Image: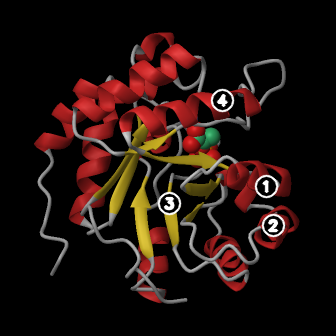
Amino acid sequence: MELKSWYAEEKPWIIAGPCSAETEDQMMETVEGLVKQGFSTIRAGVWKPRTRPNSFEGVGEKAFPWIKQAKEVFKVKFAIEVASARHVELALQNDIDILWVGARTTVNPFNVQEIADALKGVKDKPVLVKNPVNPDLNLWIGALERIHQAGIQKIGAIHRGFSTYQESIYRNIPLWQIPLDLKSRYPELLLICDPSHIAGKRDLLFEIAQKAMNLRYDGLIIESHRSPDEAWSDAAQQLTPANLKLMLDKLQIRDLTI
Ligand code: PEP
Ligand code: MN
Protein backbone atom coordinates (compact mmCIF):
# COMPACT_ATOMS: atom_id res chain seq x y z
CA MET A 1 0.00 0.00 0.00
CA GLU A 2 1.27 3.46 -0.83
CA LEU A 3 -0.38 6.76 -0.81
CA LYS A 4 -0.92 9.87 1.03
CA SER A 5 -0.73 11.99 -2.05
CA TRP A 6 -4.52 12.24 -2.31
CA TYR A 7 -4.92 14.29 0.78
CA ALA A 8 -3.56 17.73 0.27
CA GLU A 9 -5.51 20.79 1.25
CA GLU A 10 -5.56 20.77 5.00
CA LYS A 11 -2.69 19.77 7.29
CA PRO A 12 -3.60 18.50 9.81
CA TRP A 13 -6.89 17.35 8.31
CA ILE A 14 -9.68 17.94 10.83
CA ILE A 15 -12.93 15.99 10.53
CA ALA A 16 -15.41 17.30 13.09
CA GLY A 17 -19.06 16.64 13.82
CA PRO A 18 -21.56 14.89 16.01
CA CYS A 19 -21.27 11.28 17.06
CA SER A 20 -24.74 10.78 15.54
CA ALA A 21 -27.09 12.58 13.21
CA GLU A 22 -30.14 13.09 15.46
CA THR A 23 -32.53 15.62 13.92
CA GLU A 24 -32.52 18.03 11.01
CA ASP A 25 -32.23 20.91 13.42
CA GLN A 26 -29.33 19.39 15.35
CA MET A 27 -27.47 18.70 12.11
CA MET A 28 -28.00 22.13 10.60
CA GLU A 29 -27.13 24.02 13.77
CA THR A 30 -24.06 21.89 14.51
CA VAL A 31 -22.73 22.18 10.97
CA GLU A 32 -23.38 25.92 10.95
CA GLY A 33 -21.43 26.24 14.20
CA LEU A 34 -18.55 24.17 12.82
CA VAL A 35 -18.40 26.14 9.58
CA LYS A 36 -18.34 29.41 11.57
CA GLN A 37 -15.27 28.05 13.38
CA GLY A 38 -13.58 27.27 10.09
CA PHE A 39 -14.20 23.50 9.77
CA SER A 40 -15.15 22.09 6.38
CA THR A 41 -15.11 18.28 6.70
CA ILE A 42 -17.99 17.04 8.82
CA ARG A 43 -18.55 13.63 10.42
CA ALA A 44 -21.88 12.16 11.57
CA GLY A 45 -23.00 8.63 12.36
CA VAL A 46 -26.12 7.58 10.48
CA TRP A 47 -26.19 3.93 11.62
CA LYS A 48 -24.73 3.48 15.09
CA PRO A 49 -23.13 0.24 16.29
CA ARG A 50 -24.17 0.21 19.95
CA THR A 51 -22.79 -2.30 22.42
CA ARG A 52 -26.15 -3.11 24.04
CA PRO A 53 -29.55 -3.32 22.36
CA ASN A 54 -32.50 -1.05 23.12
CA SER A 55 -30.49 2.14 22.98
CA PHE A 56 -30.40 4.70 20.19
CA GLU A 57 -29.07 2.95 17.08
CA GLY A 58 -28.92 5.86 14.68
CA VAL A 59 -31.68 7.46 12.62
CA GLY A 60 -30.62 5.60 9.46
CA GLU A 61 -31.58 6.75 5.97
CA LYS A 62 -33.68 9.60 7.36
CA ALA A 63 -30.40 11.50 7.85
CA PHE A 64 -29.55 11.71 4.13
CA PRO A 65 -31.83 14.64 3.27
CA TRP A 66 -30.41 16.55 6.26
CA ILE A 67 -26.87 15.83 5.08
CA LYS A 68 -27.76 16.91 1.55
CA GLN A 69 -29.18 20.17 2.86
CA ALA A 70 -26.15 20.83 5.07
CA LYS A 71 -23.83 20.16 2.14
CA GLU A 72 -25.76 22.53 -0.12
CA VAL A 73 -26.12 25.34 2.39
CA PHE A 74 -22.65 25.19 3.96
CA LYS A 75 -20.53 23.71 1.13
CA VAL A 76 -18.98 21.10 3.40
CA LYS A 77 -17.79 17.53 2.82
CA PHE A 78 -19.40 14.71 4.77
CA ALA A 79 -17.99 11.52 6.27
CA ILE A 80 -20.16 8.68 7.59
CA GLU A 81 -19.61 5.15 8.94
CA VAL A 82 -20.52 2.17 6.74
CA ALA A 83 -20.86 -1.34 8.13
CA SER A 84 -22.42 -3.30 5.25
CA ALA A 85 -22.73 -3.41 1.47
CA ARG A 86 -26.16 -1.78 1.79
CA HIS A 87 -24.68 1.12 3.75
CA VAL A 88 -22.05 1.62 1.05
CA GLU A 89 -24.70 1.58 -1.66
CA LEU A 90 -26.82 4.18 0.16
CA ALA A 91 -23.80 6.35 0.98
CA LEU A 92 -22.78 6.39 -2.69
CA GLN A 93 -26.33 7.08 -3.87
CA ASN A 94 -26.55 9.99 -1.45
CA ASP A 95 -23.28 11.56 -2.50
CA ILE A 96 -21.42 11.08 0.79
CA ASP A 97 -17.85 12.31 0.32
CA ILE A 98 -15.86 10.12 2.70
CA LEU A 99 -16.63 6.70 4.19
CA TRP A 100 -15.20 5.10 7.30
CA VAL A 101 -15.22 1.54 8.57
CA GLY A 102 -15.91 1.40 12.32
CA ALA A 103 -13.88 -0.45 14.93
CA ARG A 104 -16.50 -3.16 15.42
CA THR A 105 -16.56 -3.85 11.70
CA THR A 106 -12.79 -3.95 11.18
CA VAL A 107 -12.64 -7.04 13.41
CA ASN A 108 -14.71 -9.07 10.94
CA PRO A 109 -13.06 -9.99 7.62
CA PHE A 110 -16.38 -11.19 6.14
CA ASN A 111 -17.91 -7.82 6.85
CA VAL A 112 -14.92 -5.87 5.57
CA GLN A 113 -14.81 -7.95 2.39
CA GLU A 114 -18.51 -7.28 1.80
CA ILE A 115 -17.82 -3.55 2.10
CA ALA A 116 -14.78 -3.85 -0.18
CA ASP A 117 -16.82 -5.70 -2.81
CA ALA A 118 -19.47 -2.97 -2.70
CA LEU A 119 -16.71 -0.41 -3.33
CA LYS A 120 -15.36 -2.06 -6.48
CA GLY A 121 -15.17 0.40 -9.32
CA VAL A 122 -15.46 3.40 -7.00
CA LYS A 123 -11.74 4.31 -6.78
CA ASP A 124 -11.97 7.99 -5.98
CA LYS A 125 -13.87 7.97 -2.70
CA PRO A 126 -11.70 8.33 0.41
CA VAL A 127 -12.18 5.36 2.76
CA LEU A 128 -10.80 5.45 6.30
CA VAL A 129 -10.45 2.27 8.37
CA LYS A 130 -10.60 2.43 12.16
CA ASN A 131 -8.45 0.05 14.17
CA PRO A 132 -10.26 -3.09 15.36
CA VAL A 133 -11.53 -2.92 18.96
CA ASN A 134 -8.93 -5.54 19.93
CA PRO A 135 -5.20 -4.78 19.73
CA ASP A 136 -4.43 -6.77 16.58
CA LEU A 137 -2.27 -4.93 14.07
CA ASN A 138 -2.63 -7.60 11.38
CA LEU A 139 -6.40 -7.46 11.53
CA TRP A 140 -6.19 -3.69 10.97
CA ILE A 141 -3.75 -4.15 8.09
CA GLY A 142 -5.92 -6.92 6.62
CA ALA A 143 -8.94 -4.63 6.54
CA LEU A 144 -6.90 -1.86 4.89
CA GLU A 145 -5.64 -4.36 2.31
CA ARG A 146 -9.16 -5.57 1.50
CA ILE A 147 -10.30 -2.00 0.83
CA HIS A 148 -7.14 -1.28 -1.11
CA GLN A 149 -7.48 -4.42 -3.22
CA ALA A 150 -11.01 -3.35 -4.15
CA GLY A 151 -9.33 -0.48 -6.01
CA ILE A 152 -9.82 2.31 -3.48
CA GLN A 153 -6.85 4.62 -3.81
CA LYS A 154 -7.69 7.27 -1.24
CA ILE A 155 -7.22 5.18 1.85
CA GLY A 156 -6.38 6.05 5.44
CA ALA A 157 -6.29 4.58 8.95
CA ILE A 158 -7.99 5.94 12.07
CA HIS A 159 -6.54 5.20 15.50
CA ARG A 160 -9.45 5.14 18.01
CA GLY A 161 -7.92 3.08 20.83
CA PHE A 162 -8.55 -0.47 22.05
CA SER A 163 -11.02 -2.12 24.42
CA THR A 164 -9.78 -3.21 27.81
CA TYR A 165 -11.32 -4.86 30.84
CA GLN A 166 -8.73 -3.22 33.03
CA GLU A 167 -9.31 -0.06 35.01
CA SER A 168 -8.23 2.90 32.85
CA ILE A 169 -8.69 6.63 32.59
CA TYR A 170 -9.38 6.05 28.89
CA ARG A 171 -12.53 4.68 27.34
CA ASN A 172 -10.32 2.82 24.87
CA ILE A 173 -6.62 2.54 25.74
CA PRO A 174 -4.47 4.16 23.07
CA LEU A 175 -1.57 1.63 22.89
CA TRP A 176 0.36 4.13 20.75
CA GLN A 177 2.87 1.49 19.69
CA ILE A 178 0.30 -0.21 17.45
CA PRO A 179 -0.41 2.77 15.16
CA LEU A 180 3.31 3.58 15.25
CA ASP A 181 4.10 0.08 14.02
CA LEU A 182 1.48 0.55 11.29
CA LYS A 183 3.17 3.81 10.34
CA SER A 184 6.61 2.24 10.20
CA ARG A 185 5.28 -0.56 7.96
CA TYR A 186 3.43 1.88 5.69
CA PRO A 187 5.07 5.32 6.01
CA GLU A 188 2.91 6.74 3.24
CA LEU A 189 -0.41 5.64 4.71
CA LEU A 190 -2.57 8.50 5.97
CA LEU A 191 -2.98 8.20 9.75
CA ILE A 192 -5.65 10.06 11.69
CA CYS A 193 -6.31 10.05 15.44
CA ASP A 194 -9.77 9.87 17.00
CA PRO A 195 -9.23 11.39 20.45
CA SER A 196 -12.98 11.29 21.20
CA HIS A 197 -13.29 7.50 21.30
CA ILE A 198 -9.92 7.06 23.04
CA ALA A 199 -10.85 9.58 25.73
CA GLY A 200 -14.52 8.94 26.40
CA LYS A 201 -14.61 12.26 28.24
CA ARG A 202 -13.85 15.74 27.08
CA ASP A 203 -11.15 16.69 29.59
CA LEU A 204 -8.73 14.14 28.11
CA LEU A 205 -9.14 15.21 24.50
CA PHE A 206 -6.42 17.84 24.42
CA GLU A 207 -3.58 15.66 25.70
CA ILE A 208 -4.46 12.85 23.27
CA ALA A 209 -4.73 15.23 20.32
CA GLN A 210 -1.39 16.83 21.27
CA LYS A 211 0.30 13.44 21.48
CA ALA A 212 -1.03 12.56 18.01
CA MET A 213 0.36 15.83 16.66
CA ASN A 214 3.73 15.17 18.33
CA LEU A 215 3.77 11.80 16.58
CA ARG A 216 3.09 13.55 13.26
CA TYR A 217 -0.34 12.10 12.63
CA ASP A 218 -1.97 13.55 9.52
CA GLY A 219 -5.21 14.61 11.14
CA LEU A 220 -7.89 14.28 13.78
CA ILE A 221 -11.50 13.11 13.72
CA ILE A 222 -13.28 14.66 16.69
CA GLU A 223 -16.88 14.68 17.87
CA SER A 224 -18.63 18.02 18.16
CA HIS A 225 -22.27 18.73 18.93
CA ARG A 226 -24.30 21.95 19.31
CA SER A 227 -25.17 20.93 22.90
CA PRO A 228 -22.91 18.05 23.90
CA ASP A 229 -24.62 17.16 27.18
CA GLU A 230 -27.85 16.53 25.31
CA ALA A 231 -26.29 14.28 22.65
CA TRP A 232 -28.11 10.99 22.02
CA SER A 233 -24.80 9.10 21.98
CA ASP A 234 -21.34 9.75 23.43
CA ALA A 235 -22.44 12.90 25.31
CA ALA A 236 -19.47 12.99 27.72
CA GLN A 237 -16.81 13.21 25.00
CA GLN A 238 -18.30 15.83 22.66
CA LEU A 239 -17.41 19.53 22.50
CA THR A 240 -19.31 22.50 21.15
CA PRO A 241 -17.86 23.79 17.86
CA ALA A 242 -16.50 26.87 19.69
CA ASN A 243 -14.80 24.79 22.38
CA LEU A 244 -13.37 22.46 19.75
CA LYS A 245 -11.81 25.44 18.00
CA LEU A 246 -10.39 26.75 21.30
CA MET A 247 -8.89 23.36 22.04
CA LEU A 248 -7.34 22.94 18.60
CA ASP A 249 -5.91 26.46 18.73
CA LYS A 250 -3.91 25.44 21.80
CA LEU A 251 -2.26 22.49 20.06
CA GLN A 252 1.35 22.79 19.07
CA ILE A 253 1.44 21.50 15.55
CA ARG A 254 4.60 20.66 13.69
CA ASP A 255 4.99 21.57 10.10
CA LEU A 256 3.52 18.52 8.40
CA THR A 257 4.70 19.53 4.98
CA ILE A 258 8.30 18.61 5.77
C1 PEP B 1 -18.10 6.60 16.12
O1 PEP B 1 -17.22 7.09 15.39
O2 PEP B 1 -19.05 7.26 16.58
C2 PEP B 1 -17.97 5.17 16.51
C3 PEP B 1 -19.01 4.39 16.73
O3 PEP B 1 -16.69 4.83 16.63
P1 PEP B 1 -15.91 3.45 16.86
O4 PEP B 1 -16.18 2.58 15.67
O5 PEP B 1 -14.50 3.94 16.93
O6 PEP B 1 -16.39 2.87 18.16
MN1 MN C 1 -19.21 8.26 18.92
**Residue under pointer 2:** 118
Q: Earlier in the sequence, mark 1 or mark 4?
A: 4
Distance from label 2 to label 3 (Cα)?
Answer: 21 Å
**Residue under pointer 3:** 158
Q: Do labels 4 and 3 touch, CB within 8 Å?
A: no
Q: Do labels 2 and 3 touch, CB within 8 Å?
A: no
Disc 1 versus disc 3: nearer the observer: 1
Q: Do labels 1 and 2 touch, CB within 8 Å?
A: yes
**Residue under pointer 1:** 89
Q: Does residue 258 appear anywhere in the picture?
A: yes
- Element assignment for label 4: helix
**Residue under pointer 4:** 63
Residue 185 at what x, y percent from top left?
48, 88
Q: Earlier in the sequence, mark 1 or mark 3?
A: 1
Residue 110 at what x, y percent from top left?
88, 67
**In the depicted view, which residue is nearer to us: 123 or 141?**
123
Residue at the image position 70 percent from the left and 78 percent from the top: 142
Residue 51 sits in quarter: top right
Residue 5 at what x, y percent from top left?
37, 82
Query: Which amino acid lies under the numbered mark 2 shown in the image of this protein?
Result: Ala
Residue at the image position 72 percent from the left and 27 percent from the top: 62
Disc 4 versus disc 3: nearer the observer: 4
Residue at the image position 26 percent from the left and 61 percent from the top: 10
Callout 3: CB less than 8 Å from ligand 1? yes
Circle 1 packing at 10 Å, graded few (<14), some (14-19), many (20+), is some
Callout 2: CB less than 8 Å from ligand 1? no
Query: Which amino acid lies under the numbered mark 3 shown in the image of this protein?
Result: Ile
Q: Earlier in the sequence, mark 4 or mark 3?
A: 4
**In the depicted view, which residue is nearer to us: 95 or 116?**
95
